[in-house]
Image (spheres, helix red, strand yellow):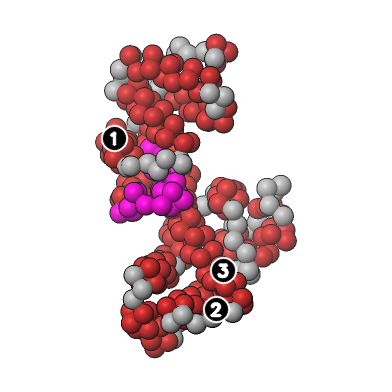
Amino acid sequence: MLGEVIDEIRCKKGLTIKEMLGSKLSRSAYDAFRSDSMNLRVEHFMCLLNRLHVIPIEVILLSKELSKLSFFLNRGEKLVSYYNKQDKEALLAERAFLKEANLDSKFVQHMFWALDFFIADLEKQTIPEKEMQRMKQFFLEIETWYRYELYLFAGIGELFLDGDFLRMVLSALSKQQLNINSKKQALALNCLHTVFLNALTLRDQDLALHTLNLLLEAEIHPNLTYEKHYTCVLRLMYCYFLEEEEESLDLLNNYYRILSDLHCDHIFRITWEWYEKFCLIYEKPMKLKRDVY
């Protein structure tokens, strides 16, 4: 599926696999990805796109390939919802639908395993260990492709810095319910952070404000410390760089002191890189000095 599309683009551009991979990814990992037997980490996947210098029409190809999976993601979430409600009749109806649809995909087989597991459990049958392993695989597939969709759509915007494209990304992300479990909320919030940073790079105040409001409205899960800090820093950067509120720089300075005192080195380093980048883009002097923290 997706690996085949990437390889097709590589061939069209006349690149060897070695030229495309560079030092970021092993040949064995790429071969497994190309044969659809392994998923790549998101950063490796985005690196491949970058090295291919993917143009928008090729991105559409990728997006269409991923959009085919939306059907399975949506139905997968339905299965979990029916199981949690202990609605055996709905699960049986879903199984009959999938069987009649006769869809050719490994995800369908995983769904059959999940359905059989759920139905057996509701009927209080003993679940064989083999079925337990299949269930783990089912949830792994659902979560993996959810992550791919979110990060891919936000990351493509980062590659092209195109305002209209980012608005499309934001429109898609706005439909996600942010107030959900911590793992999925983290993915959605990280995507919104990416869209916001791109909007700030484009000096697109409307897009930045819309994205920021979504971030501020979310009831962020208590475990998501990084996401909370990133949102706070981005709000201050919006006020300083787009609203040109000088007092927000004092607040940003205080925030960096807090991060330093708490030894939040990773958050400090990432957000400081943002500050340096936007000082250059907006042609502002770097009034804050890193060595004082």
Residue 115 position by quadrant: bottom left
Crowdedness of circle 3 by 10 Å Cα count: few (<14), some, many (20+)?
Answer: some
**Which of disc 1 and disc 2 is earlier in sequence?**
2
Q: x and y percent of residue 195 in the render? A: 39, 41
Q: What residue type is labelled 1?
A: Leu
Which mark is on residue 209?
1
Identify whether 121 is placed above or below 270. below
C-alpha separation, residue under disc 2 versus residue under disc 1: 50 Å
Q: x and y percent of residue 3 in the render? A: 58, 64
Q: Name the residue under label 3.
A: 137
Q: Give the residue at x 34% y 76%.
A: 87
In-front residue for pair 235/178: 178
Q: x and y percent of residue 119 in the render? A: 43, 80
Residue 106, magenta (yes or no): no
In-front residue for pair 30/233: 233
C-alpha separation, residue under disc 3 versus residue under disc 1: 39 Å
Q: Is mark 1 on a helix, strand or loop?
A: helix
Q: Give the residue at x 42% y 87%.
A: 99
Range of the magenta residues? 175-196
Residue 89 seen by the camera: yes
Q: Which amino acid does label 2 sit on?
A: Ile
Q: Give the residue at x 37% y 83%.
A: 92
**Which of disc 3 and disc 2 is earlier in sequence?**
2
C-alpha separation, residue under disc 2 versus residue under disc 3: 15 Å
Q: Where, quadrant-wise, is the C terminus in this rendering?
A: top right
Count of picture labels: 3
Q: Name the residue under label 2.
A: 127
